Image (spheres, grey):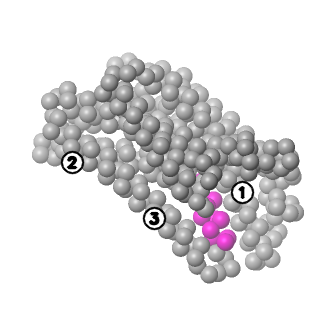
Amino acid sequence: MDLSAALPTYVVTLREGFEASLVVGIVLACLNKVGQNQLNRWVYQGIGGGIVASVLVGLLLAGILQGVTSYQSPYTPIIKECLATLFGIIAVAMLSWMLIWMTQQGKNLKGDVEQGIAAALKGNNGAGKGVFLLVFIAVLREGFETVLFIVAKFENSWKIPSIGAVLGLTTAAILGFLLFQLGVKINIRLFFKIMGIFLLLVVGGLVLGVLKHLNLAVILLGQVEPSFSQLCFFSGDSCILGSLVWDGSDILPDKTFPGIILKSLFGYRQTLYLGQIVLYLLFLFTVGTLYFRSLDIPTPPK
């Protein structure tokens, strides 16, 4: 059993789940402050609804991939690799945007949630539904990003990654409980900074996976339709990836420890091509620069 596959989903769900826990904690604190504890049940319903909706999205995406795989056609493997590439690109874009946006907007999180609660309470009879919607959207947003990441990275087996996701959410819930119920001091800024760096590297590994799927799609297309073989600029397995730069199959294979840990967390491959390395470094430089700049944005005055 390859438990290393649980590590990246644990990192992603821990960060995403803790962000959702902050929203839920602030909502409950606001309701308690204004004496509206009877609306707490809407908060818990929003949490449950967001989780269920996220799981349904995951099942839908998994069903699409499964349906394509079971369809008998010479183009089936090509379509599957194209879908994996598409899901990967969307996951990279969403997680990168979330990383930068949350870092910028996180300083205003408490005020934004309080404004949302105030608007919901003004709805009188619709206050409960407003609270439900606020929590539901927060949980669904984080859950959708997590589900998309799992589908994009683990198209073959989702059992172990799902265990990592459950453990990540459980840890996030425990941290939220310690913070809001027991008053334990947690350096939230430092937590998000560290987890943000981990997430940046994890998504960078996803970029390598996207290139792998795209490269294989082009190779398969050229095999089915020889006229498209000219899309491969290099011979062999590299195709669109360029010349081979690193071959660690004897030094650091990606199917044994510690290479398998590096592969699961950061997308390490025992064979790396020039195109993969260039795009990986370009991603880290671009998104990493935006991320660290967002850390320096001062907190606006109250």
Q: Residue at x 31, y 52 (%)?
A: 49
Q: Secondary structure at mark 1?
A: helix
Mark 1 packing: few (<14 Cα in 10 Å), some, or many (20+)? Answer: some
**Label 2, label 3: how far apart the Cα atoms are:** 26 Å
Q: CA distance from mark 2 to mark 1?
A: 45 Å
Count of residue discs: 3
List the residue tagged with mark 1: 212
Question: Given the image, on which type of amino acid does mark 2 rest?
Answer: Lys
Amino acid under disc 3: Leu
Task: Using the numbered discs, state the Cα–Cα distance from disc 1 to disc 3 in whole angstroms.
Answer: 24 Å
Is residue 227 positioned above or below 296 on the image? below
Q: Is residue 291 within the magenta segment? A: no
Q: Residue at x 58, y 79 (%)?
A: 71
Pick whichever, 11 or 97, lies toward us: 11
Any part of residue 285 in sight: yes
The picture quadrant where one finds residue 293 is top right
Q: Secondary structure at mark 2?
A: helix
Which amino acid lies under the numbered mark 1 shown in the image of this protein?
Lys
Element type where label 3 sits in the image: helix
Give the magenta part as a residue range.
77-89
**What residue would you read off at disc 3?**
60
How far across and how far down the image is residue 127, in percent? 17, 43
Q: Is residue 238 above or below residue 125?
A: below
Q: Determine the image quadrant of residue 75.
A: bottom right
Residue of label 2: 129
Closer to the camera, 166 or 293? Answer: 166
